């Protein structure tokens, strides 16, 4: 079957599975149809009005690496609110491509693109539009129902790792991206974007760059908060790194207005209530997910803490985060364990 026939067959399946979904009014059949990248699009070289960006602390995705881009409609501005959140103009695209190096130790090793996720701002919310790359790495095809891909690579420790990588379907996308019943981005917050990036061989703060490009409303950058890079032992202290890991990996659900609001466990970086953070907080529901442990966090004892138990698990009924994870984030677990163990024990 030719590539064109595969696309047509896929669209027929999509139209049957999602007969009235609004995405069908916005999604194009192939990633190349949007014109975001120069040919060959596998090189991910953006056209002039598609701007690369990065974030300080990344969501763990089975060690997949990511390329991020933003496209704001011409003559439109991103505005910022009093709480330092962004308001994006309608028609804005956030573009994120997931990939693996064949050998993590060698940045020049072969790179395999797996999926590209688009978030498109339409009216009051965002639409998630997933694309899966073909084996030839020439294009990515619309995949609203998700997909599975066999992926393997040589890890930083020299070990070979193989997993069945999961591309989330529409419902899974929404389960993480919903805030106050509206689908929204997770990573590009002011504090997570407040760092330098290389543009045309010059290092410049990303927010300053966006202002200079005319896509972001000007504001005082000197007093803005900044999220540390939890993977960098020299960037912030242990508490800051642990809170950054929890914020990006857990707080999109565990926050007020998030899907896990009823748990009472709130893990946003701005949270200051020790009980809301889980310290000596019993779980709302006991059972397998608690591991027969009493509290989310037992200061000084990671091994007695539900949080540690769940982030180390690969059991679908126990593990946290609960979606699209086949591996334990070893480095993240070590940070959280060290953080809990560093807390003074309670009498």
Image (cartoon, grey):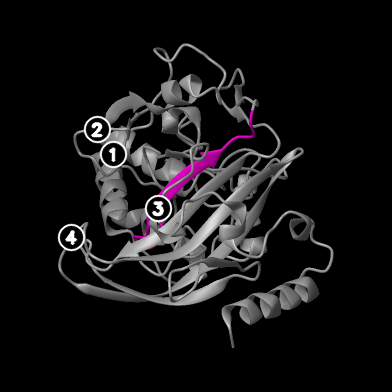
| Residue position for label 1 | 345
Q: Disc 1 to disc 4, how far (Cα)?
A: 43 Å
- Residue 148 position within the rendered picture, expressed as x and y whole percent measured from the top left: 50, 76
| Residue position for label 3 | 66
Between circles 3 and 2, the one closer to the viewer is 3
Please determine whether, in this image, residue 168 is positioned above or below residue 150.
above
Q: Earlier in the sequence, mark 1 or mark 4?
A: 4
| Residue position for label 2 | 235
Q: Disc 1 to disc 2, how far (Cα)?
A: 26 Å
- Residue 180 position within the rendered picture, expressed as x and y whole percent measured from the top left: 70, 40
Between circles 2 and 4, the one closer to the viewer is 4
Q: Is residue 65 magenta?
A: yes
Describe the element under mark 1 as helix, strand or loop: loop
Please determine whether, in this image, residue 30 is positioned above or below residue 223.
below
Describe the element under mark 2 as helix, strand or loop: loop
Q: Is residue 6 magenta?
A: no
Q: Residues within 10 Å of mark 2 (few under 14, many from 20)?
A: few
Q: Are marks 3 and 4 in contact (CB under 8 Å)?
A: no
Q: Residues within 10 Å of mark 4 (few under 14, many from 20)?
A: few
| Residue position for label 4 | 106
Q: Earlier in the sequence, mark 1 or mark 3?
A: 3
Report the magenta residues as a range: 61-74
Describe the element under mark 3 as helix, strand or loop: strand
Please determine whether, in this image, residue 81 is positioned above or below residue 22.
above
Q: Residue at x 42, y 53 (%)?
A: 44
Q: Are marks 1 and 4 in contact (CB under 8 Å)?
A: no
């Amino acid at each position: 079957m030719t590539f064109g026939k595969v696309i047509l067959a896929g669209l027929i399946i999509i139209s049957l599975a999602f007969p009235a979904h609004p995405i069908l009014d916005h999604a194009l059949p192939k990633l190349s149809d949007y014109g975001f990248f120069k040919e060959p699009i596998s090189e991910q070289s953006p056209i002039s009005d598609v701007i690369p960006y990065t974030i300080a602390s990344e969501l763990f995705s089975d060690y997949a690496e990511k390329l991020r881009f933003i496209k704001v409609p011409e003559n439109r501005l991103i505005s910022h609110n009093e709480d330092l959140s962004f308001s994006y103009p309608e028609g804005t695209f956030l573009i994120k491509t997931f990939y693996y190096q064949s050998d993590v130790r060698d940045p020049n090793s072969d790179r395999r693109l797996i999926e590209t996720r688009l978030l498109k701002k339409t009216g009051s919310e965002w639409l998630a539009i997933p694309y899966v790359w073909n084996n030839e790495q020439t294009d990515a095809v619309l995949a609203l129902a998700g997909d599975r891909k066999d992926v393997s690579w040589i890890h930083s420790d020299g070990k070979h790792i193989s997993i069945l990588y999961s591309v989330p379907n529409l419902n899974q996308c929404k389960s993480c991206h919903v805030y106050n019943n509206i689908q929204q981005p997770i990573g590009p917050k002011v504090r997570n974007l407040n760092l330098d990036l290389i543009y045309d061989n010059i290092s410049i703060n990303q927010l300053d760059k966006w202002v200079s490009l005319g896509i972001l409303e000007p504001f005082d950058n000197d007093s803005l908060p900044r999220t540390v890079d939890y993977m960098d032992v020299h960037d912030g202290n242990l508490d800051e790194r642990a809170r950054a890991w929890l914020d990006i990996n857990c707080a999109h659900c565990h926050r007020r207005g998030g899907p896990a609001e009823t748990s009472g466990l709130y893990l946003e970086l701005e949270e200051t209530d020790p009980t809301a953070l889980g310290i000596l907080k019993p779980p709302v529901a006991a059972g397998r997910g608690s591991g027969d442990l009493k509290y989310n966090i037992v200061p000084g004892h990671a091994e007695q803490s539900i949080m540690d138990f769940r982030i180390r698990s690969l059991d679908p009924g126990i593990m946290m985060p609960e979606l699209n994870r086949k591996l334990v984030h070893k480095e993240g677990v070590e940070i959280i364990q060290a953080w809990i163990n560093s807390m003074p024990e309670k009498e």
